[in-house]
Amino acid sequence: KKAVNKSYMKLYIKKNRNFIVKIMEKKDLVVGDEAPLFKLDSFNAGSVDLAEFKGQKTVVIFSRYFGCPICLVDLSTLMKRKAEIEDKGAKILYITQSGEKIAQEYIEKESIDFPVIPNSKDELYAKYGLGVMTAGAFTEIRSKLKEAKELGIEHGEYEGWEKQGPGQFVIDEDGIIIHASTGWLDVDSILSVL
């Protein structure tokens, strides 16, 4: 075995400190947990305070960023099926790593009317237990990229962390998680608990 150079390790830890801390602080959320509250400004709906959503079911979707072709496939699916979610009385909140300029382009292009919330520093992803993409998400990449290509979706600007795992959470009227899923969007699973 090779000995690890201590100065190299110190440099690695210094350069990757935020990532290491995020992974160490990551706590998987499961059904039955209380949803971590947040209050953040959205790109298109003013300030969003999750505490104000008590009394109604809420679907919180964590994407990566709008330049990600797989995320755009999922966004396309969400836009086609959002009425099914809303018809069950649920509100949608969409979390992204994208910056305002690109987010606004997609909000207008796709006529997104649910709150799109920036979280470029990834604290909210970590609060919800989302870190490195899961093995399951990695295995779906090839088929999702094929779907993106068929839809004419190309990779846009790199704005986020490429290995950031996406996920979806359904929160009930009392602020309790009733569905927790890491990986790419699965609308059928969301609908099954609404």
Image: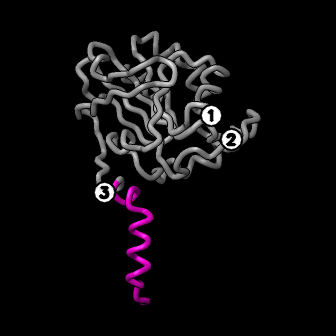
Circle nearer the viewer, 3 or 1: 3
Q: Residue placed at 52% from the left, 13% from the top?
A: 83
Picture coordinates of residue 26 (x, y %)?
31, 50
Q: Is residue 110 left or right of residue 120?
A: right
Q: Residue placed at 50% from the left, 15% from the top?
A: 84
Q: Residues within 10 Å of mark 3 (few under 14, many from 20)?
A: few
Q: Return the mark for residue 156.
A: 2
Sequence-earlier tag: 1 or 2? 1
Residue 4 lies in the magenta-colored region: yes
Q: Nearer the viewer, residue 141 or 11?
A: 11
Q: Name the residue carrying label 1.
A: 72
**Magenta stretch in the rendered image:** 1-21
Give amino acid for label 1. Leu
Q: Name the residue carrying label 3.
A: 24
Image height check: is 24 above or below 187? below
Task: Using the numbered discs, state the Cα–Cα distance from disc 1 to disc 2 in whole angstroms.
Answer: 10 Å
Give amino acid for label 2. Gly
Magenta stretch, overall SS: helix
